[in-house]
Image: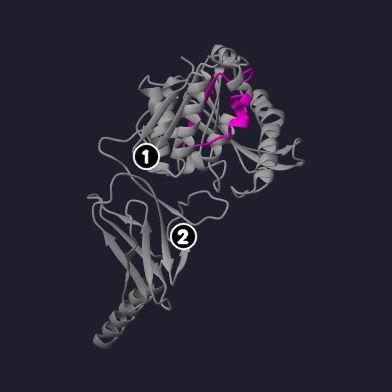
Amino acid sequence: MKHLLSLALVFACTCTALAQKSGPVISPDIQDDHRVTFRLRAPKSQSVALRGQWEKEPAALTQDAEGLWSLTVADVPAGVWEYSFVVDGLTMIDPGNPSLKPQRNPSASILHIPGTPPNPWDFQDVPHGTVHQHTYLSKALSKQRSAWVYTPPGYESGTQKEYPLFVLQHGSGDRHETWVVHGKANWILDNLIAAGKAQPMIILMIDGHPLGQVPRDMADRRALSLAAFKNELFQDAIPLVESHYRVSPDREQRAIAGLSMGGWQALSIGMINLDRFAWIGSFSGAVDENEIKPALDDAAGTNTKLKLLWIACGEKDFLLERNNQLIAKLKASGVNYEWHETPGDHSWPVWRNYLTDFAPKLFR
């Protein structure tokens, strides 16, 4: 009997050791004091580093005898952060983390550290809206496309007849769902509406890459992509929303905004389609003067139709000079605008703040 117990104990210990070797790797492992442990099982790798958005320099992980690499980072600031592993020089996602930044070529995982008190992009105990997913055949593009639509809290059971429509676009390399999954636009609006800071509204988010991702230096291809995006927006996406949701047809109840590439799309399309949009926002976007020339040439008419032209860019953003040039041209032409040069660079922590500041100004 004594020998049987000893054998059972050895067997249990062996199973535990094997389970630790082959079991799931917990990463990221978030503690209450904001310490976060990152882990990666890569026994044959020579080096593993963590590249986190909250730090400027990568940090090396250490390997144990079983080939498990790990690193504990103290005091990660509250926020929604991107991070990646660099394994023998190759950048990759964290395979232990199902939360990925939606991109055309996914390369970043998401680490969300809630703030105390909560930040506008944190989940809070307030009424929540709904994010709807649509797949449709685009008549403008003759191919399958996708869109996400946010409806505000109480939409399904409420009695409000019509809601304003806000078209919100992502940046280059991202996807139509990035504003929700990574930008937390739905929680931002939920929290703003609950606090009485923003009007209930419907938000449309579509894929901004109708022709695939186009490099910045391919001007002709970019022009074709912009035209294709506009055609899909007007011929497919907005009609889809109008057929499924209670949205106001009034141009003064329509807004368009976006970040980076989405800001360019919002400016290029919104400024010359003021019969469709009265509110325009550009978050770290840029636009060529010729793309909005009709609006610049008729400043009086533009100002009559435009409720708000809101432009913001970070002081360390590589597009700041382009934004300064745009502001100078708007000022010289006499077009009204609201300009914000803020701390930060070309990144999502900046753009969440911009949405938080911009949304309360809409439809007032």
SS for callout 2: loop
Q: Residue at x 38, y 59 (%)?
A: 51
The residue carrying pointer 1 sits among few (fewer than 14), some (14 to 19) or many (20 or more) residues within 10 Å by Cα, namely some
Q: Within 10 angstroms of label 2, few (less than 14), some, or many (20 or more) residues?
A: many
The tally of labels here is: 2
Residue 314 visible in the shown view? yes
**Where residue 226 appears, x then y in whole percent?**
66, 37
Q: For the view shown, which residue lies furthest in the front direction?
A: 332
- Name the kind of residue labelled 1 in the image: Glu
The image position of residue 103, as x and y in percent, is 54, 50
Residue that numbered label 2 is attached to: 93
Side of 274 relative to 125 (left or right): right
Indicate whether 60 appears above or below 13. above
**Which quadrant does the N terminus fall into?**
bottom left
Magenta-highlighted residues: 269-293
User: Does 13 sit above or below residue 108?
Assistant: below
Residue found at x 49% / y 19%? 308
**Residue 65 vs residue 349, the one in the foreground:** 349
Question: Where is residue 230, by image quadrant?
Answer: top right
In screen coordinates, is 259 left or right of 195? right
Give the numbered dot on residue 161. none
Q: Which residue is mark 1?
A: 315
- Label 2 and label 1: CA atoms lie apart by 29 Å
Is tag 2's residue or tag 1's residue first in the polypeptide sequence?
2
Residue 12, image quadrant: bottom left
Instruction: Provide the secondary structure element on which disc 1 rests.
Output: loop
Residue 236, percent from left and from top: 70, 31
**Pointer 2 with pointer 1, Cβ within 8 A:** no
